[in-house]
Amino acid sequence: MHLDWTALGQVAAVSTGVTVAVVVVFALGVLGLAQLEGARDQQGRTSNPGLTQAALCFLACAAVVAYGIFLIVPQFH
């Protein structure tokens, strides 16, 4: 049995990198929600940049998850 260690290393590196990126983007989305709550507490109104940041970050996370499911499920190809 022959293992292509280079390919295995590439898959491990890409999956680790994408995982870290998704976690960072999700954390930025949570930060946007925290800014939204902070604006509500201080001024009694909403923070549009915080809401926009949260929505875009969570949408990006959902897109990465949907792409991963697309790659795994063979009926989608």
Image (cartoon, rainbow, N blue to C red):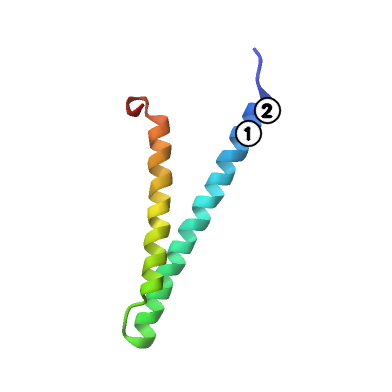
Q: Give the residue displayed 40% in from the left and 72% down from the top.
A: 49
Q: Give the residue displayed 62% in from the left and 39% down from the top.
A: 13
Q: Which residue occupies the foreground of this view, 77 or 20?
A: 77
Above or below for 65 versus 39: above
Instruction: Characterize the local packing of mark 1: few (<14), some (14-19) or many (20 or more) Cα atoms within 10 angstroms.
Output: few
Q: According to the image, label 1 marks what residue? A: 10
Could you tell me residue 45's position as x and y percent?
31, 82
Q: Give the residue displayed 40% in from the left and 69% down from the top.
A: 33
Left or right of 3? Residue 51 is left
Q: According to the image, label 2 marks what residue? A: 6
- The residue lying furthest to the bottom in this view is 43
The quarter of the picture where the C terminus appears is: top left
Q: Quadrant of residue 70?
A: top left
User: Disc 2 versus disc 1: distance between alpha carbons?
Assistant: 6 Å
Amino acid at the residue labelled 2 = Thr
Above or below for 22 versus 2: below
- The residue lying furthest to the top in this view is 1
Could you tell me residue 72's position as x and y percent?
41, 30
Q: Give the residue displayed 38% in from the left and 81% down from the top.
A: 39
Amino acid at the residue labelled 1 = Gln
Instruction: Confirm or deny contact between disc 2 and disc 1 (CB under 8 A).
Output: yes
Element at label 2: helix
The quarter of the picture where the N terminus appears is: top right
